[in-house]
Amino acid sequence: MDFIDYYKILGIDKKATQADIKKAYRKLARKYHPDLNPNDKEAEKQFKNINEANEVLSDTENRKKYDAHGKDWKHADDIERNQRSQGSRSQSYSGQGQPGEDYSDFFDSMFGGQRGSGFGQGRNRTQFKGQDFNAELQLNLTDVYTNESQILTVNGKKIRLTIPAGIENEQVLKITGKGAPGVNGGPNGDLYIKFNILNNTKFKRYGNNLHSDVDLDLYTSLLGGDIMVDTFSGKVKLKVAPETQNDTKVKLKGKGFPVYKKDGEFGDFIITYHIKTPTNLTHKEKELLSELKKLR
């Protein structure tokens, strides 16, 4: 993984106080906030870098690790533990044998015959998994009704991603091996993508089911009839039963949202009828309603 200079990102030096860090972060966060820079990919990238830098440098312990180990700061505890272990072994072996004795056979047995590698190089062979990357991707609800292909740029590399239909808001996908390279030949880290799904429709989504409110005029609710209703995949014709009551629910099976990673399976579309009382009645309408009232 390339070294990221968090001090440079925030425009401060290594002697900066916590107050300096907070002040620099707030200033830059306001400047590059996505709400003030809509559809600006560069500003979005800068905002993420600023947040990452602040998370590390504003934490005293993480800052110490970063100052000491740079890009490998997340592995600081393992590295320091290994250093202590190797230092202890080095002290226990020193002074053994007679002055001038050749220790080459002993070192060969301990380090696989790699002459001249020394304790320092043996220590550096400890392998660590690379740093995991975290990213967020914002999509509209209409985007995830079908499988969606996206090309993401992560740490300068393009990654082609197929997003399965039906993915949930705030769901996280793990892309194995697409994080930072491992240390000393260790495995790559992973990429975790969090999805923010914005509902750009008039429907409400609850899991795999979609819900919609439909206004029904008084006369159709009383006498019944045919109406056209919008669904996610287009209009459908429904037959309203006579004497339909307010808040009656109708379920259209299989007309809801795709089930995640199950091709051809869909949730249900649930309609709630809301009966609208007529207003601005004419004199004739009032007379007829009066007659109807007398009949009841």
Image (cartoon, rainbow, N blue to C red):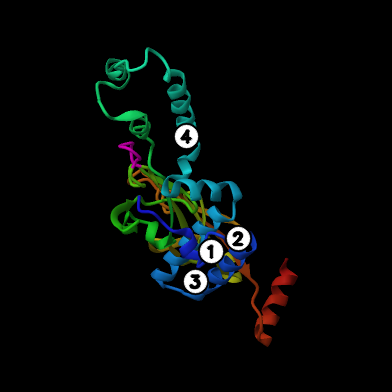
- State the residue position of label 3: 32
Q: Mark 1 falls on what kind of element?
A: loop
Whether tag 2 and tag 1 are in contact, CB under 8 A, the answer is: yes
Other residues around mark 3 within 10 Å, as few (<14) / some (14–19) / many (≥20): many
Boundaries of the magenta span: 182-188
Seen as rendered, the residue at the extreme right is: 294
**x then y, percent, for residue 153:** 33, 59
Q: Is residue 279 above or below residue 248?
A: below
Q: Hey, which quadrant is residue 155 in on the image?
A: bottom left
Q: Mark 3 falls on what kind of element?
A: helix
Q: Can residue 230 be seen in the rendering of this structure?
A: yes
Q: Indicate the amino acid at tag 1.
A: Gly
What label sits on residue 224 in the rendered view? Answer: 1
Q: Nearer the viewer, mark 3 or mark 2?
A: 3
- State the residue position of label 4: 78
Q: Say how many tags the image has.
A: 4
Seen as rendered, the residue at the extreme front is: 99
Q: Depth check: 102 or 192 in front?
A: 102
Q: Indicate the amino acid at tag 4.
A: Asp
Q: Is residue 187 magenta?
A: yes
State the CA–CA distance, disc 4 to disc 1: 73 Å
Name the magenta segment's main secondary structure: loop
Q: Mark 4 falls on what kind of element?
A: helix
Q: Indicate the amino acid at tag 2.
A: Glu
**x then y, percent, for residue 120:** 37, 33
